[in-house]
Image (cartoon, helix red, strand yellow):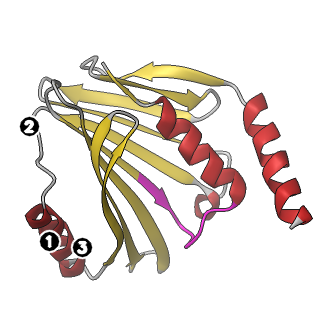
Amino acid sequence: MKKILLTLIIANLILSCADFETKTDVNNKLKIDVPKDWAFQNSGQEIISLMRFTDTTLYYKDRLLFDISWESDKTEFTHEFKKLMDSIAISKGWTPKNQSFKNVNGFDAYFFDVVGNDSLGNFDFVIDNRYLNQKDKDGTIFLYITRWKEKLNERDSLLVEKIFETLERK
């Protein structure tokens, strides 16, 4: 128990010392805090925007890849939508897991993981999908966090939640 607590304390200290900067998408619809030394791309058009960021100093299997997009159409999160997402994942040979409807950080949300295998590189991956709507705001935010390991370590888990908590719909 002491070892787990010590690991969490150290991970929190490392993250509290990390420098973050606020990034805004090209359509000025959302903003999020990103580690300052990470590679960052920002693109889009009138009806869609995309921000992508990752730590390129790490070996790809140790990285987290964040893709956040805003699309002007609002997606309704229903049980039919869940079935559609499951069928799309299954048709690609992937396994949907941990599906849930939530209210989190002021968003109506649908969360789910997809576990799969990249046959070209012959490696496993997990995509943490978070689809978000906010009342009285147009469009839907799609957040995908890709990792090449089944479980996150304590530091990565804290980092994902720290970044996610800063996501704001403008």
Q: Nearer the viewer, mark 2 or mark 1?
A: 1
Q: Is residue 134 above or below residue 27?
A: below
Local crowd at mark 3 within 10 Å, few (<14), some, or many (≥20)? some
- Label 1: how many Cα within 10 Å (few below 14, some 14–19, many 20+): few
Q: Position of residue 89 (x, y in %)?
A: 24, 73
Residue stretch rendered in magenta on the structure: 145-153
* Residue placed most toward the observer, 6 or 18: 6
**What residue type is disc 2 on?**
Asp
Q: Residue at x 65, y 30 (%)?
A: 37
Q: Earlier in the sequence, mark 2 or mark 1?
A: 2
| CA separation in Å, label 2 and label 1 | 20 Å
Is 106 covered by the magenta stretch?
no
In the rendering, at what x and y percent does residue 10 appear? 85, 47
- Of helix, strand and loop, which mostly describes the magenta segment? loop
**Along the viewing direction, whichever of 81 and 17 lies nearer the viewer:** 81
Name the residue that disc number 3 marks.
Answer: 89
- Across and down, in percent, residue 139 comes to 15, 33
Q: Residue at x 78, y 47 (%)?
A: 11
Disc ID at residue 83: 1
